[in-house]
Image (cartoon, helix red, strand yellow):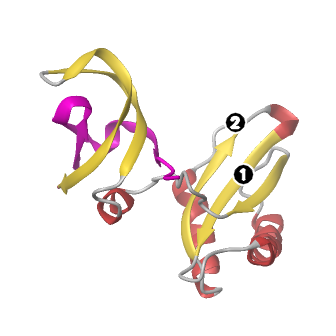
Amino acid sequence: MSIKTEQLEALLEPIISSMDYEYVGLDYTSQGRHSILRIYIDSAAGVNVDDCAKVSHQVGSVLDVEDPISDEYTLEVSSPGMNRPLFKLAHYEQFIGEEAKFKTFRPQNGENIGTGQRKFRGFITSVDGNNIQFTIEENQIISIAFSEIEKGNLVAKF
């Protein structure tokens, strides 16, 4: 089953924002009766278990009424954590200078990219329009269109 992420976000983001949390994004993993809808929230003061429970209760009630996902699933509300997922172009802009790892939908080929490479790790250098520049190994700069990025996360610092 595929869900309409944009419609789900349009439903959930205003609810979460009205509760004074930042809606970071969502992941839906379809696995039959073991599907998971994971919603990421944040706030300036950080997020704890009580915050997640409060948002889960409110969002769960709305999802029960609106029923945007017809299959069975488990709702999880989480903080973005140390490996913060990057869902929007604005997230890449917000974290310029930070290290990220990301995976593209299709293999990338280019002057500074290994042939057929899909997984990358590097520092977010800049955002230019819909393109994100990364500094990868040996100070090589690559530019990837945001629409080509399947999944991105910050790399945790210890």
> Which amino acid type corresponds to the residue marked 1 in the rendered image?
Leu
- Does the magenta segment cover residue 146? yes
Give how far across and how far down residue 60 sits, in percent.
81, 68
Determine the residue located farthest toward the top in the rendered image: 115
Question: Relative to residue 84, is residue 103 depicted above or below?
Answer: above
Q: Position of residue 19 (x, y in %)?
A: 65, 86
Kind of element beneath mark 1: strand
Magenta part mainly helix, strand or loop? strand
**Quadrant of residue 39 in the image?**
bottom right
Comes first in the chain, label 2 or label 1: 2
Front position in the image: 63 or 59: 59
Does residue 77 appear in this view? yes
- Which stretch is magenta? 129-158
Q: Amino acid at mark 2?
A: Met
> Percent position (x, y) of residue 120?
37, 31
Of tags 2 and 1, which is closer to the observer?
Answer: 1
Q: Is residue 54 left or right of residue 42?
A: right
**Distance of mark 2 from mark 1, alpha carbons?**
13 Å
How crowded is the residue under tag 2: few (<14 C-alpha within 10 Å), some, or many (20+)?
few
Residue 56 left/right relative to 10:
right
In the rendered image, residue 53 lying in the magenta stretch gets the answer: no
Q: Hey, which quadrant is residue 136 in on the image?
A: top left
Say which residue label 2 marks: 1
Residue labelled with disc 1: 37
Quadrant where the N terminus is found in the figure: top right
Left or right, 8 with respect to 129, comes to right
Res. 9 mark? none
Residue 71: % across, % down: 81, 44
Write the residue at 72% across / 36% down: 30
> Number of labelled discs?
2
